[in-house]
Amino acid sequence: MLDLHYWPTPNGKKVTIQLEECGVEYRVVPCNIGRGDQFTDAFLSINPNNRMPALVDHAPADGGPPISIFESGAMMLYLAEKTGQFMPSDPRGKYEVVQWVVWQMANQGPKTGECGHFRRLGDTEGDQSYAVTRFTDEVNRFYGVLNNQLYNQPYLCGDHYTIADMICYPWCVNWAGQGQDINEFKYFKRWFDELSDRPAVQRGMAVGSDLRNDPAAMSPEELASLKAMLYNQRARPAPDQGGLL
Ligand SMILES: N[C@@H](CCC(=O)N[C@@H](CS)C(=O)NCC(=O)O)C(=O)O
């Protein structure tokens, strides 16, 4: 059995899309990042980076103890290898996919996240126009990268739908909130519309739609403590005694 520690965000939905596409059985373990589940000792033993998603495979191929994995890209590579689906096995084809997975993890994911953060902030923390322009432009560049890649091939890595497509898709769904117009990127839009119609993509995107924290139902104190917990996180102290020096 696979346990997916999950909250319904684009980074989580990449993995639910893949699980749905592969048709494997999995269990969703809610990790409520608005309540601080990502900071519990149990969760940190799976992901020392206190971020969801995380995956635990209770039946790994080597028959040994459970394997736990953090970072959505690493989880998707693991699942592609475990299921033998949506990633070529020859080195040329495999590394075509791996480089797009790494591109998404190093570029599209983090910077689109910052784009959303600064755009949502408005002027509550002072003038954010420099950051908004910087990240909105960078996200625009990403849509251009995807559009060019899809100009003469149906999927990001050629003729076959792979985890490279699945990992990029959820971060594109909120294109309007990112200050973009996908009608300017017609090859991208063809791909986006096709993926949006896939039943497994729809199922993956819908996982956890009942899981939410409603800011409107929170008191000002609760909102302030949520903000203090999520923003400006700094280093968690290491144990003082008994370590390797
Ligand atoms: N690179 C990581 C990013 C994970 C990440 O940023 N997760 C966010 C939700 S999308 C989170 O857990 N945030 C909790 C927090 O900020 O404390 C991945 O792709 O798995």
Image (cartoon, rainbow, N blue to C red):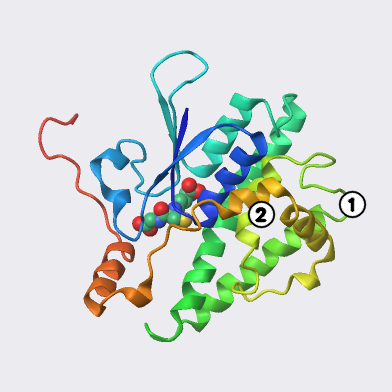
Using residue 96 as the reference point, say whether residue 12 is left or right of it.
left
User: Which residue corresponds to mark 2?
Assistant: 169
Residue 77 to residue 8: above or below: above
Using residue 160 as the reference point, say whether residue 126 is left or right of it.
left
Quick one: 177 or 219, which is closer to the camera? 219
Using residue 118 as the reference point, say whether residue 242 is left or right of it.
left
- Disc 1 crowd, CA 10 A, few/some/many (<14, 14-19, 20+): few
| Residue at 33% in and 63% down | 230
Q: Secondary structure at mark 1?
A: loop
Residue 7 to residue 174: above or below: above
Using residue 93 as the reference point, say whether residue 129 is left or right of it.
left
Res 168 seen here: no
User: Which residue corresponds to mark 1?
Assistant: 152
* Residue sticking out furthest to the front: 210
Quick one: 222 or 86, which is closer to the camera? 222
| Residue at 62% in and 45% down | 17
Q: How many marks?
A: 2
Residue 167 place in picture, x, y as percent: 63, 48
What residue type is disc 2 on? Answer: Tyr
* Residue sticking out furthest to the right: 152
Mark 1 vs 2, N-terminal side: 1
Residue 88 place in picture, x, y as percent: 74, 29
Q: Quadrant of residue 220?
A: bottom left
